[in-house]
Amino acid sequence: MKRRLAFIGALSLCSMIYAQAEKDAPEDSISRVYTLGAVEVIGKTTKASVPDKLDMIQMREFNRDNLTDAVNLIPGLTISETGARNEGAFYLRGFSMLQTPIFYDGVPIYVPYDGNVDITRFTTFDLAQISVSKAFTSVLYGPNTMGGAINLVSRKPAKKLEIDGISGMKFSKEGLNGYNTGINIGSRMKKFYFLGSFSFLDTKFMSLSDKFTPTDYEDGGRREHSAAKDLKISAKVGYTPNATDEYSVSFIIQNAEKNISPSILGGQYRDYPKYDKKSVYFKSNTYLGLATNIKVTAFYDNYYNIMDQFDDKTYLLQNTKKAFHSIYNDYSLGGSFNLSNESIKNNVLQFAFHEKYDSHKEHNGGIAANETTGQTAVTGEPIQKYLDNTISAGLEDTYTFNKYIIAVAGLSYNSRSNSKAQEYGTHYLTGEKNVLYDFPTGSDDAFNYQLATILHVAKGHDITVSASRKSHFASQKDRYSSKFGSQEPNPDLASEFSWIFDITYEGKITDKFQYQASVFRNNVDDAIYQITVGTQDNGDPIYQNRNVGKSVFQGYELSFGWEAMKNLTLGGNYSYIHRENKEDKTVKFVGVPDHKFIAYGKYKLSSWDAYFHFDTEVNSKRYVTSTGTTVPGYMLMNAKIHSQVWKGLACEIGSRNLFDRNYSISQNYPREGRTFFTSVVYNF
């Protein structure tokens, strides 16, 4: 009874803000897309109900507040996590985030050294849509899109004044878990527009399932050391002097601090007291005449991260050799331009040029002595620098033969050069200890090419057939990291390549039933594998990354959306992905289940403006080590009730992991059990 009263009380206390009245949602979602940030692949006609895109309405309806939870709805995409660093990640048709870059309004975002980013730190309140490109990825994205691309497209105001947002709280049997707030304020006038966004997620702790079995290092209930805070502020100012031209400047500030829960079997004890990102970018579209447009992008990204490793679970002392105070201070500077011309009949010809300069600085900072705690003084390291420059030039032509056939061909040349790479410690060639030394510099390049044909076989029925050869450059970490002595650097590590084949059929039966089916095969050559090359003093192996692998990722996807009756909408998607090491079939790929299924439904109550939403997710077992260790599959259920209580004002109550499943996607790092949430949403 007390829990029920707390639940009802929390609903009455929730404060402010989100969403559009249901009747206006679809049109509003489209009009608020920041089109300068979209990277369109001509010929893609995916319908909203069977998406390779998620729009702002869907993200709010499913209550997906961060990017990890949001992209999990996409067919062919599997979320993962790096438990020892508390980082959200994903695989797209078997390709990791290193091979599938993320873009924000067409601007690439990743930590230069690691080559990826913690996607759980990205909130979704300021996004208009998430666009996922799989097999055929336009050369307009630039380099490194071997596995596809994910573009986070921000919002743009559609009215003279608009304010919308959401605030609420999450709780479980263990008490109040945290709060969430997101608000957008914008204005659209004749030639100018402005949008400001604010979001804040405060996670007090993560609740484990009642079915979790306690260990010596995790007693259940409140997950040990699991708090996190995410703050995001963004703003955009734009100028549209006429019907064809547009110019805008945007900035984003993300500040995060996150605990890292230890393995339930003990081990590393880490923290991220700072996980910050700042961005500013300029985008424009100008009509030059003669059926020619030019789009220009310029950007600057800064990443500042601190990771601490402690001696034990008290998270107090850093006296042992394994402890450290690691500081990353990185930035990326770059830009691109895209020329498009439609002067030739039935042709859209586009040329794109990209350049990106990546700077990584790292060192272990000094730690002051503290007699009270027993901390001894630790001397810091000199700063180590890594500098990369990446360029890409691509040409893409879309030719319309007739109303039934469209062909898209693309060709690109990509190059990455390294001008500095330093490390501090034991020299990897001479064995000299405690020295700052330079690795050899080098470069790598690759040609990519692709072809797609779109067949309009009938009204509302399209078939797309595509073949691509795409590449992925090795990251700075892949090439130079020693991983605390367990890995030998390989400065000459070259690109991976993959042949991507895909057939996709999408269609609809009236406007009530829409569906999509895809079959794909990805043949990966020169894949980067870890090879054992020696033995450490303690007997553990020493690895080196080398281009020795051959593998195949293949499978199929099915999606549908169905308006079953006037007030009932159903949908779902199923993905089958099988990955195989062609060099040694006993070596298993980790992180991706063979089978994943998502189903959802929405029932509107006709007597008042309210609806009931549910969604369920089923995953089969997945490998978590290359030797064949697995974690079991699982099924999750989420549900909520949304009701408008006043014009533009609505309340929600719901539950995540309704049946309190105890499950993991990373070995010895359990996920959250059953939680409840309440929120108030508002728009005008």
Image (cartoon, grey):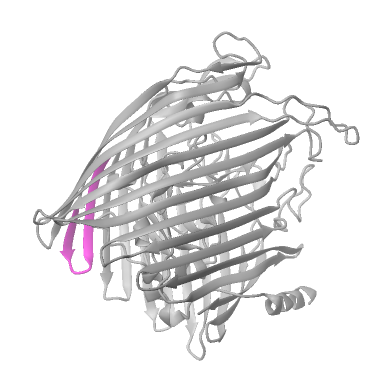
Judge left or right: residue 345 versus residue 11: left
Q: Residue 15 location in percent, x, y?
A: 65, 75
- Please indicate, yes or no, whether residue 313 appears anywhere in the rendered image: yes
Q: Residue furthest right?
A: 372
Picture quadrant of residue 445: top left
Residue appearing at x 56%, y 16% in the figure: 437
In the rendered image, which quarter is residue 657 located in?
Answer: bottom right
The residue located at (50%, 27%) in the rendering is 386
Whether residue 470 is visible, yes or no, is no
Q: Is residue 490 left or right of residue 505?
A: right
How far across and how far down the image is residue 383, in percent?
A: 61, 26
Say which of 116 and 599 sits in front: 116
- Can residue 150 be found in the magenta stretch? no
Q: Is residue 466 magenta?
A: yes
Residue 58 percent coordinates (x, y):
46, 68
> Horizontal and vertical percent for residue 480?
51, 24
Left or right: 462 in relation to 143: left
Q: Does 611 appear above or below 354?
A: below
Q: Main secondary structure of the magenta part?
A: strand
Magenta residues? 453-469
Residue at the extreme bottom:
607
